[in-house]
Amino acid sequence: MDLFEQLVAIENIKRLKARYFRCMDTKDWDGFAEVFAPDAVMDMTSEVGATEEAITKGNIEIAAFVRAHVGDVVTVHHGHTPEIDVTSPTTATGIWAMEDVLRWPEEAPLQALHGYGHYHETYELLGGSWRIATIRLTRLRLDLE
Amino acid sequence: MDLFEQLVAIENIKRLKARYFRCMDTKDWDGFAEVFAPDAVMDMTSEVGATEEAITKGNIEIAAFVRAHVGDVVTVHHGHTPEIDVTSPTTATGIWAMEDVLRWPEEAPLQALHGYGHYHETYELLGGSWRIATIRLTRLRLDLE
Amino acid sequence: MDLFEQLVAIENIKRLKARYFRCMDTKDWDGFAEVFAPDAVMDMTSEVGATEEAITKGNIEIAAFVRAHVGDVVTVHHGHTPEIDVTSPTTATGIWAMEDVLRWPEEAPLQALHGYGHYHETYELLGGSWRIATIRLTRLRLDLE
């Protein structure tokens, strides 16, 4: 893959992640499912109170999992300064700095979360479109209320 | 327009928006007026307390409108994860995630604002430079003090 | 330098700055030293309580300086909307919007800092890799606790 093709892939993967954030925060769950490969794996085991169930497989299942956790929560997720490596014409890796700000409905046991960390991801080109293949979150800091 | 020309346009539009943020927050109002097309339209009707007057036409008028609202306010505006589509050699569209943090002078009725949302924009290439043609803000969350 | 080479340089400089942030916040001080040119200059004289000593020369010295100040502090540094100009095949300039969120250990005199501003930087291509040559921080706002 030449440098130009890599630049195009990098821009497309940045946009893919932009859609991940926008679909989650605007609660577009069909759009959210489409940013993942069909056999994608999401690893949220580093999250507060997470168990082994925090590893979810399949793009439909991932969208259902995230919707179950934050479907009725006001969420803001922002991604910053991606480091994307195109490792072959159809695969890539990426690290994104992130910040999330969540506010639960009044009756919920947890009221608010403000966190910071990094997404560690891999991507696959499927049918001409880049998709998230694996996603894992590590935290720098997590404030709960 | 080939892919290479699109990549160049996308980078130039990202820089245009960077200038929008920097000029607003450093109160460079002449520079701020120049990021807009002469007949640009800014739609802030979704903002708190906004009326129809929150639609402003013309780059000079937009700079005057924004200056009147936040000229003496400490403002921080950040933009994230742009999704830019180059729709012709001279037009483009974009969505930006955003966060803004405002602190008014002590005597003001409103003390502080912390918001999150998305800019929905269109761009035009005029005389070799990309300009913002239309800008509209939607909110995910808005905290006032 | 043609437009394509400039695009490649811009993406590489964005990644360089991403590594600056990630290495600082994950306390990878060897990695942090490597983002700077050997004779790099960091100017933090605009920071709270800074003296002339806040100008540091040399990449090893810069890493030691930053480590001494925030090695045991939970830090989050995010960079936004870069404006990068490639000024020759081996030099470039950049402005980055930034936000930092720091929390000191309980026994420290200062408890927390939340700031916003801009990095003003220059870069050099050395041995095929872009490095930060000079870095200076200006502030829009700084909240201390």
Image (cartoon, coloured by chain):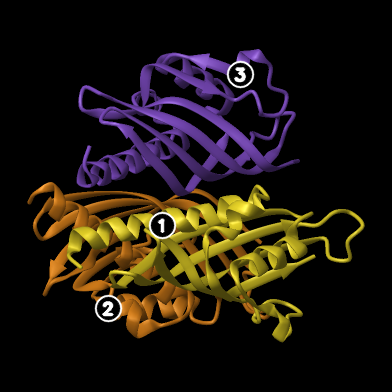
Chain colours: A yellow, B purple, C orange
Farthest residue to the front: give it: A127
Query: Residue shown at 73%/84% (left/top)?
Result: A51
Mark 2 chain:
C
Q: Nearer the viewer, mark 2 or mark 3?
A: 3
Is residue B145 visible in the rendered image? The answer is yes
- What separation in Å lies between label 1 and label 2 (alpha carbons)? 25 Å
Query: Residue shown at 41%/61% (left/top)?
Result: A130
Does mark 2 fall on the same chain as mark 1?
no
Q: Residues within 10 Å of mark 1 (few under 14, many from 20)?
A: many
Q: Is residue B124 above or below residue C94?
A: above
- What separation in Å lies between label 2 and label 3 (alpha carbons)? 48 Å
Q: Nearer the viewer, mark 3 or mark 1?
A: 1
Q: Quadrant of residue A77?
A: bottom right
Q: Residues within 10 Å of mark 2 (few under 14, many from 20)?
A: some
Q: Nearer the viewer, mark 1 or mark 2?
A: 1
- Nearest the viewer among C1 and C102 is C1
Mark 3 chain:
B
Relative image position of residue A116 (x, y in whole percent): 59, 67
Q: Is residue B142 above or below residue C78?
A: above
From the image, which quarter does the N terminus of chain B lie in?
top left
Q: Residues within 10 Å of mark 3 (few under 14, many from 20)?
A: some
Using the image, tell me which numbered label, if any, was put on residue A14: 1
* Residue with the mark numbered 3: B54
Using the image, tell me which numbered label, if any, was put on residue C34: 2
Q: Amino acid at mark 3?
A: Ala
Relative image position of residue A24 (x, y in whole percent): 63, 55
Q: Amino acid at mark 1?
A: Lys
Relative image position of residue B106 (x, y in whole percent): 69, 35
